[in-house]
Image: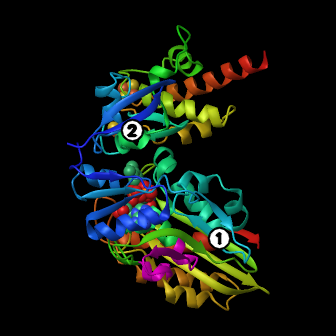
């Protein structure tokens, strides 16, 4: 399968990339890892006039802790870098649990977290993680830089909040406070498959009480779902069995699964409930 | 149609080739350069038969544009053996009878090679994990895993000499 014809540019500076985006707007597609875009080009689901390959842009292949403790992930940071990251293992258990579950090891060599977020596939794993962690996306365009909270970034299936002349350059996750409990659980039919259902959980505990809670679901709705009601139940609790059960029920209620080849709606709802209980009871705990 | 000249090092040899931007890497390798060891199975990024090394890391060459290899290095299964001497990974596949029809073999070997370059002493679980993006429709996984562990041992004994 060949993609349709397109012009190809691989700018070497951000200015050059932004100029191209400004000139071509809707006619352009940004190429990061290509692990979603190239299959779409081959299937002719996307027929851009021009591809703007950002792989030669300098200084975007990083993930690091900023001076204020924020985790910053550049647009060219690959899934495999996150999978091998000691920083994530030490401080971001939700992310460390999710990284090895995104696609398969070969796809992870090229695919990027920022590309996943931009692709906005409702089955995408990272979007749930960013929702649970209250992350945000940094975009640059002709008007300069702006920061978009993850909850506002995905506006529909395969639709993000970027303007056609904007490039996403970074994802950001706030510094964890207190003791952190985090997990990502995903049911897949085989390695590399999208989630039948997935659950991201991130909880901060201080003085024996939950001070912040994040819960988000993958693959059980038209988008990734942040379950605010379940988060609210957990805040102020001591993460006892009763509040966990209640949060799990609220998450199952918030899911909007459809029956398909991966399972029935009732089954997926049941998985969500079970995973929330399991993630909150067995997640990695670490002192921030 | 617009073609672009790229310079790519394939199996250690610098090549200058003209490519149309939409040409996939796997087609450059197979049809452009005659390196038919890299196979096309699914063409949808699922099977891993087309796996090659791009700057030393495994990629599915049906999901990369040839033009993207400009200035980079690509290694295919043809690049594993040195003259008449097989790579330990190839030897392992031979010793452990790790192929049936052979269709997935080159991709399996490239994923295995990438694993052993990063982790010379993998556990069985590490091997299974690293090969999980490669499908074998003959389902001979057991011997494939044994072959990679065989290669790891061989490489360790060579390193110890
Ligand atoms: C076999 C297979 C299995 C998979 N399994 C999973 C899975 O289990 N879970 C999962 O979450 N994903 C999975 N995926 C999807 C894929 O891994 C991710 O969507 C992918 O990693 C996206 O990142 P990328 O860098 O490759 O993006 P690309 O494919 O390069 O781009 C995707 C989209 O985002 C846009 N884009 C990318 N970067 C930017 C940017 N910086 N600014 C603006 N727009 C941008 C592109 O224009 C395009 O529209 C799978 C893919 C394959 C092929
Ligand atoms: S042919 Fe490339 S992954 Fe199957
Ligand atoms: S040996 Fe036949 S596909 Fe693997």
Near-viewer residue (A74 or B3): B3
Say if B71 sits above or below A115 in the image: above
Disc 1 target residue? A71
**Residue density around tag 1, few if under 14, some if 14–19, many if 20 or more, within 10 Å:** many
Q: Nearer the viewer, residue A215 or A243?
A: A215
Lateral position of residue A278 relative to residue B77, left or right = right
Quick check: A101 above or below B126? Answer: below
Whether residue A133 appears in magenta in the rendering, the answer is yes
Q: Secondary structure at mark 1?
A: strand
Q: In the shown orientation, is residue A221 left or right of residue A278? A: left
Give residue B61's mark.
2
Q: Quadrant of residue A159?
A: bottom left
- B26 over A227 or under it: above or below: above
Disc 2 Cβ-to-ligand 2 distance below 8 Å: yes
Numbered range of the magenta stretch: A130-153
Element on which disc 2 rests: helix
Q: Position of residue B55 (x, y in %)?
A: 54, 37
Residue A44 is a magenta residue = no
């Amino acid at each position: 399968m060949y993609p349709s014809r397109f012009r190809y540019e691989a700018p070497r500076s951000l200015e050059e990339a932004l100029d191209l985006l400004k000139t071509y707007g809707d006619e352009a597609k940004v190429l990061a890892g290509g692990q979603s875009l190239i299959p779409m080009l081959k299937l002719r689901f996307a027929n851009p006039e021009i591809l703007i390959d950002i792989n030669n842009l300098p200084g975007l292949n990083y993930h690091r802790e900023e001076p204020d403790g924020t985790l910053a992930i550049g647009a060219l940071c690959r899934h495999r870098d996150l999978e091998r990251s000691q920083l994530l293992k030490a401080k971001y258990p939700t992310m460390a649990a999710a990284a090895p579950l995104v696609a398969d090891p070969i796809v992870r060599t090229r695919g990027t977290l920022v590309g996943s977020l931009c692709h906005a596939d409702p089955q995408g794993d990272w979007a749930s993680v960013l929702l649970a962690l209250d992350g945000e996306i940094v975009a640059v365009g002709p008007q300069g830089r702006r920061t978009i909270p993850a909850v506002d970034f995905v506006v529909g299936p395969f639709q993000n909040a970027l303007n056609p002349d904007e490039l996403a350059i970074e994802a950001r996750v706030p510094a964890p406070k207190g003791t952190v409990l985090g997990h990502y659980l995903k049911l897949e039919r085989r390695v590399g498959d999208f989630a039948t259902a997935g659950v991201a959980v991130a909880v901060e505990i201080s003085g024996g009480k939950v001070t912040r809670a994040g819960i988000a679901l993958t693959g059980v709705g038209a988008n990734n779902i942040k379950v605010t009601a379940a988060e609210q139940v957990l805040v102020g609790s001591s993460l006892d069995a009763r509040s966990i059960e209640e949060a799990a029920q609220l998450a199952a209620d918030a899911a909007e699964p459809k029956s398909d080849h991966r399972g029935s709606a009732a089954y997926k709802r049941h998985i969500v409930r079970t995973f929330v209980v399991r993630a909150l009871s067995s997640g990695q705990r670490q002192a921030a | 149609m617009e073609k672009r000249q790229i310079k790519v090092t394939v199996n250690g040899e610098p090549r200058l080739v003209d490519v149309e931007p939409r040409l996939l890497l796997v087609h450059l390798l197979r049809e452009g350069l005659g390196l038919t060891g890299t196979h096309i199975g699914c063409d949808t990024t699922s099977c891993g038969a087309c796996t090659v090394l791009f700057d030393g890391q495994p990629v599915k060459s049906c999901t990369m544009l040839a033009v993207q290899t400009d200035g980079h290095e690509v290694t295919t299964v043809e690049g594993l053996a040195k003259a008449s001497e097989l790579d330990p990974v190839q030897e392992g596949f031979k010793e452990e009878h790790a192929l049936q029809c052979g269709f997935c073999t080159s991709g399996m070997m490239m994923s295995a090679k990438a694993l052993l370059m990063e982790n010379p002493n993998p556990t069985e679980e590490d091997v299974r994990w690293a090969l999980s993006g490669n499908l074998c429709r003959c389902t001979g996984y057991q011997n494939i895993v044994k072959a990679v562990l065989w290669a790891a041992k061989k490489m360790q004994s060579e390193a110890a000499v």
